[in-house]
Image (tube, coloured by chain):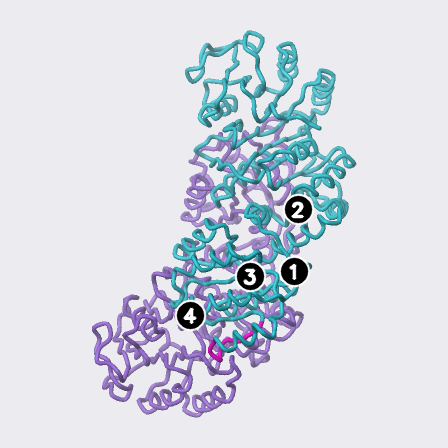
Chain colours: A cyan, B purple
Amino acid sequence: MVDLKRFFEPKTIAVIGASRNPSKVGHVIFKNVLDGNFKGEVIPINPNTHSILNHKAYDSILSVEMEIDLAIIAVPAKFVLGVVKQCKKKGLRNLVIISSGFSEIGETKLENELRKFLRESKIRAIGVNCLGLYDAYNKLDAMFIPRYRMRRPEPGAISFVCQSGAIGAAILDKATEEKHKFSKFISYGNATDIDESDLLEYLANDINTKVICLYLEGIKDGEKFYKTLKKISKIKPIIALKGGLTREGSQAALSHTGALAGDKETYLGIFRQAGVIWANGLEEMFNIASLVEKNVIFIGERAQIITNGGGYGIIAVDNIANSKNIKLAKLSPLSARKLRAAFPERVNIGNPLDLGGDATTERYKIALENCINDKNIDLILLIVLYQTPLITTDIVEIISEYHIESKKPIIAVSTGAEFTRTLSKALEEKGLATFSYPEDAIAVIDKLIWYQEKRKMI
Amino acid sequence: MVDLKRFFEPKTIAVIGASRNPSKVGHVIFKNVLDGNFKGEVIPINPNTHSILNHKAYDSILSVEMEIDLAIIAVPAKFVLGVVKQCKKKGLRNLVIISSGFSEIGETKLENELRKFLRESKIRAIGVNCLGLYDAYNKLDAMFIPRYRMRRPEPGAISFVCQSGAIGAAILDKATEEKHKFSKFISYGNATDIDESDLLEYLANDINTKVICLYLEGIKDGEKFYKTLKKISKIKPIIALKGGLTREGSQAALSHTGALAGDKETYLGIFRQAGVIWANGLEEMFNIASLVEKNVIFIGERAQIITNGGGYGIIAVDNIANSKNIKLAKLSPLSARKLRAAFPERVNIGNPLDLGGDATTERYKIALENCINDKNIDLILLIVLYQTPLITTDIVEIISEYHIESKKPIIAVSTGAEFTRTLSKALEEKGLATFSYPEDAIAVIDKLIWYQEKRKMI
């Protein structure tokens, strides 16, 4: 078992390379720890000044008297080993090394030396060449991105492990705005010591983490990685996105985090066998995570589409027909009869169940009532285009009542500007998963059904 | 030549079936024409009332004395033919028939009768079973969607022809929020008389329309359609999305707009041969249109990636390597030398040109300067993750200066929340095309390069 607890729940932190200059990484990260309302002690280390942001600065970690749980190192590459040696003297066991300038620019020897020293000294390190880490529950903001440039997420169910730095920051920023909530974010860069497998293993046991998102460029120990994935997939879902899948992309990955990328089929095969969900892009990764956040559990593969937009019904049918793990439900004769009796003749009773541009909230209620009780239906893709005039806004309460009462997942799709967004947001707040486009919803349902089936067999 | 001028530039409109009841289609559409600031005269027709929204109501179109250019019909299906006959008597030649209840619910005979009468009387009609139309330049809002539920676009370059109704409304709403600007929107429903080919032909000659988006479910006259597409693709780009591509989807389309859908390969083949851009989804359709809106003209296929997020560089390389029409540029020896001399060693001089998480605005300036002047480069994919601390906001001015001075397209990619969006918006306002994710940008570039090449050969 990898114990990384002190990385995420330290009581005392030293920022080595903290600076008075706001454009320095060491300044930004020190300031973020302070502004993030970290509950413990933070100490800046810098030999050239006495005080940084009203905190007394020390010339070296060795001058600090109190015990330090975690050091964050942001000094030029050539000084890193020296600083790490001082940390060892001080008795430190946990380091985050932000500094770049190692194997990713060909300085493999420098990195190997560092790794050797870390291993011999039994010091665990995240980095080098990384952005840092973030823990929403423990209010630990140790990333070098200024807070005004990037939102910080609320505490929640997703943990995001990202080999790349800036990409992680951009995605975290965007995902936060889209109301995703996070437990931990870790940018691990070159994985000099702690690698993706170590982090996954730790997150598998983190009670705050319900789903793990993983962006990686390459791995060093394939066997360890595969075993870890397989073990953890049984416990909680891992959604992976791999950069560097083409020959050209692999070359780019090599010079970014010094990672050997490996070929696409190998990775796809590994992920599939290990029960890892494969994301087709960054947006999709968080779309999948959001269903897990919302505790969506599929009880089967037969989907019924309810819609007031005929075109969306057709697009949804096309996408379900092309999906691997979803089937179109067939209404039972009983509910077909009931629906036929309840609706005007021009409503076609089938799949999609197209309630028409003149659909009322009442029609949606009847449709939901019957589909929820229909044993031929396992899940409902509920398309509501709020633009049409007869839909009243209390539809939100009706949908959410069915959502609460029933075990059948209801996935909502609505496209539009403010008016629509207000209603979709209301549904989200009541615990429903909502999407803007049917194709996105279906892609995500497809992958999550696959995972929930696969999980039983791993 | 199809002359539909009076549909979009009428001086007088009658709304037959206008109503005092706000939940009736006839009320909504009459109100929208008024609230949209239509410059001409609008007359409500309803035999059961004397006044609607302070406008004198007439019991029949035949009681109206002035000449009417366009009638919008929103009465139950069974009354439509009678009303159309009155319109003929009144000398009307242009109708928009909103009413549903025809072939889409199996009432093919009723629709055929109507069509026969329209053709014999040389009356042109949009509909039946449609949402209406919108002209941003002429301030004509004849759609049955309440204005508070759906945004109306500013006048601009896109025209959107949509067989489906509610889908059209939802998309128009969303696209408007994303700052797309429109010339015309037409929902044409069952295409009883005027079909997609007629509308395309009219839009080909509309000086306000620079690009046509087309959502269709099925066509009735394949040969006419193909010839029209081929003719118009030479003049302006058509971006098409087809609903009902699977067997299941085709069946759904049949009961939605009474359209025979046809198989996927047939449509793909027709579109490809005719030079029509095939959209992979609704979002992509408007992403492509947005590049045309912004006058992006590709001079070649060799793309150089500039980034401060290594991971995004890798994802971009993967996507370009997998694209059909984009190639990775190779920096000329001269610019490679210049860049090498200007940048720290850890910046890898290649494609992607990864300026690093510590990239400054100055580094971007140097990179842009060299890439713009490099004869081996045809277009620049400029990834800027504004989260990293050393990027200053004046980068927006620098990018837009290069954009204005150079003929090489610069396509910008940035992911993030408010801070990022503010800067992306600033770039958009200066005429640049911006995207949130590299994969979306590349998909769109790929398709537009294809079109610009294909256009020469049609």
Asked whether residue A349 is drawn in magenta, I would say yes
Look at the numbered discs 2 and 1 and tell me whether their residues touch, using CB distance below 8 Å.
no
Regarding mark 2 in the picture, which secondary structure is present there? Answer: helix
Q: Is residue B1 above or below residue B238?
A: below
The chain containing the residue under callout 1 comes to: A
The chain containing the residue under callout 3 comes to: A
Residue that numbered label 1 is attached to: A301
Residue that numbered label 2 is attached to: B318
Number of the label disc, if any, that sits on residue A381: 3
In the rendered structure, the answer to whether residue B339 lies left or right of residue B156 reads right
Q: Could you tell me residue A216's position as x and y percent?
A: 66, 38
> Can the viewer see residue A197?
yes
Over which residues does the magenta segment extend? A343-350
Regarding mark 3 in the picture, which secondary structure is present there? Answer: strand
Q: Could you tell me residue B84's position as x and y percent?
A: 37, 87
Q: Could you tell me residue A360's position as x and y percent?
A: 42, 69
